[in-house]
Amino acid sequence: MAITADVLNSLISITQFNKGQASKIFDRLRTERQLIVLKNNTPSAVILSPEEYERLAEIEEDYQLLLLAQERISRGSLDRVVSFHEAMANVGISETDLNEAEDVEIE
């Protein structure tokens, strides 16, 4: 029931945009992760906060990496698989090094 209430609270009409309330709508994204825009009482679009967009993009990236790893494992022999801890030891990186490292964006 709480999920239904959350969805209902996140509904906004396209009419609100047409009445110049866009700023007010975008202000709601400071406290809400997503808003569902209705056109003719039918969901037409979803507006996401930047944080929610980033969270979903990371989930998608992790999923794509998982699929790639599963594909590579299925094509190869499991005796060539190296555990995470073995790989880190092979390149001389510790858990502490990872925790202290800054995030790096690769383009």
Image (cartoon, rainbow, N blue to C red):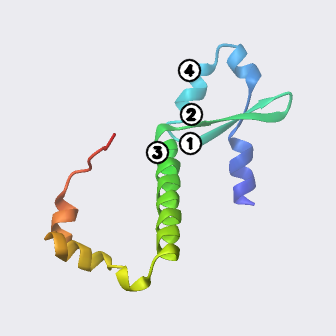
**Of 67 and 23, the residue lying toward us:** 67
Q: Residue at x 54, y 36 (%)?
A: 29
Q: How packed is label 1: few (under 14 Cα within 10 Å), some, or many (20 or more)?
A: some
Q: In terms of sequence position, does the residue under pointer 3 or pointer 4 come before the other?
A: 4
Asked if disc 3 and disc 2 are in contact, CB closer than 8 Å, the reply is: no
- Give the left or right position of residue 101, taking residue 45 as reference: left
| Camera-side mark, 3 or 2 | 3
**Of 64 and 43, the residue lying toward us:** 64
Q: Which mark is residue 54?
A: 3
- Give the left or right position of residue 49, taking residue 99 as reference: right
Q: Amino acid at mark 3?
A: Glu
Q: Amino acid at mark 2?
A: Arg
- Above or below for 41 versus 5: above
Residue for badge 4: 23
Asked if disc 3 and disc 4 are in contact, CB closer than 8 Å, the reply is: no
Asked if disc 1 and disc 2 are in contact, CB closer than 8 Å, the reply is: yes
Q: How packed is label 2: few (under 14 Cα within 10 Å), some, or many (20 or more)?
A: some
- In the rendered image, the quadrant that contains the N terminus is bottom right
Residue for badge 2: 28
Q: Which mark is residue 73?
A: none
- x then y, percent, for residue 18: 72, 14
